[in-house]
Image: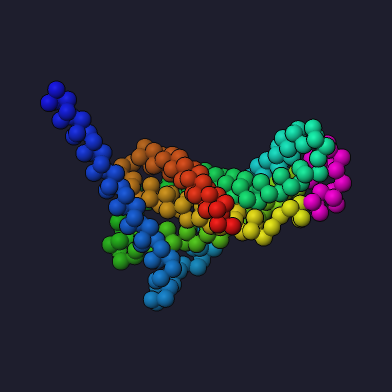
Amino acid sequence: MPVTAESLFGFIGRRTVSFLKNLHDAALLINNTFYWTFLSPFKGKPIRVRASISEMVKTGYNSVPIVAVISFFVGIILALQAAYQLRKVGALIYVANLVGVSITRELGPILTAIIVAGRSGSAFAAEIGSMKAAEEVDALVSMGINPVRFLVAPKLIALMIMLPALTIFSDFIGILGGLLLSKAALDINPYNYFQQTVNSLLIKDVMTGLVKAWAFGVVITVVGAYQGFKVEGGAEEVGRRTTASVVASIFLVIVFDLFFTTLFYYFT
């Protein structure tokens, strides 16, 4: 019995110490990332503009096709599901309300974030992890170059700009998908659908989605960078950390989505 208790408390202690160490490392990375992104430009160390633009192209522009296809299909699916219930009460025109509000407040930001987390968040972890495994990060430090400023800050700037932009694009395409479905299958006049959508949407609906998208961009960048810097080993460890970054990013995106949804529900 004493041996069992000792093993149990030893297991709990090791897990606690590991958790606290990981929490400390994550907090340190967040602190450094925000310093090199927002404060260092005022202290004579500007951001890497070309690297940031390059990251914008990779994370934003190159994601447009997949975001467009998925958002279009989601708009159609949402319109079909809404029509299934609203047809029973003779209120098909309110399909426009449901599609517009649902996509701008919820589905647009979260679907875009999940796509970017799987596409770009994993790329961040793989890139930094490969550099860590090849000791390129240590080489940057030995040359006096801060790896967070060199690698993470451009990625953070890119996602903070491009994820809200992709969200607006996703909202437009999703609403367009609902409009085309309503015209083809529900026989709703496109002008009436457009007017109903405009009347149902408020500025705060769009702003809610954009605030969520901005926060999701920060989360995806920090998680991808954190997992990349934690690589210790070869290709197998890089693959494991890349997978962990996608899982953790999607989980935290859902958590932050719940937080912001609750916040906006009670305070707007």
Q: Give the colour scheme shown.
A: rainbow
Residue at point 87%, 40% (across, down): 187
| Magenta-drawn stretch contains 195 | yes
Up-down relation of residue 256 to residue 44 (above or below): above
Q: In the image, is residue 7 part of the stretch drawn in magenta?
A: no
Residue 213 lies, in percent from the top left, at 56, 54
Q: Is residue 13 visible?
A: yes
Give left or right: position of 54 versus 14: right
The residue at 32%/49% (across/down) is 23
Q: Is residue 245 left or right of residue 103?
A: left
Placement of the N terminus among the 4 image quadrants: top left
Quadrant of residue 39 within the rendered picture: bottom left
- On the rendered image, what quadrant is the C terminus found in? bottom right
Q: Identify the residue at horizontal 40%, vertical 66% (top origin).
A: 36
Residue 68 in view (yes/no): no
Provide residue 264's location: percent of width, then percent of height: 56, 54
Q: Which residues are magenta?
A: 179-196
Residue under the image location 12 percent in, 26 percent down:
2
Image coords of residue 95 (percent x, y) = 76, 42
Instruction: Report the magenta stretch's main SS.
Output: helix
Would you say 139 lies left or right of 262 here? left
Question: What is the x, y in percent for residue 130?
Answer: 38, 47
Hey, which residue is sitting farthest front in the picture?
Answer: 266
Name the foreground residue: 145 vs 180.
Answer: 180
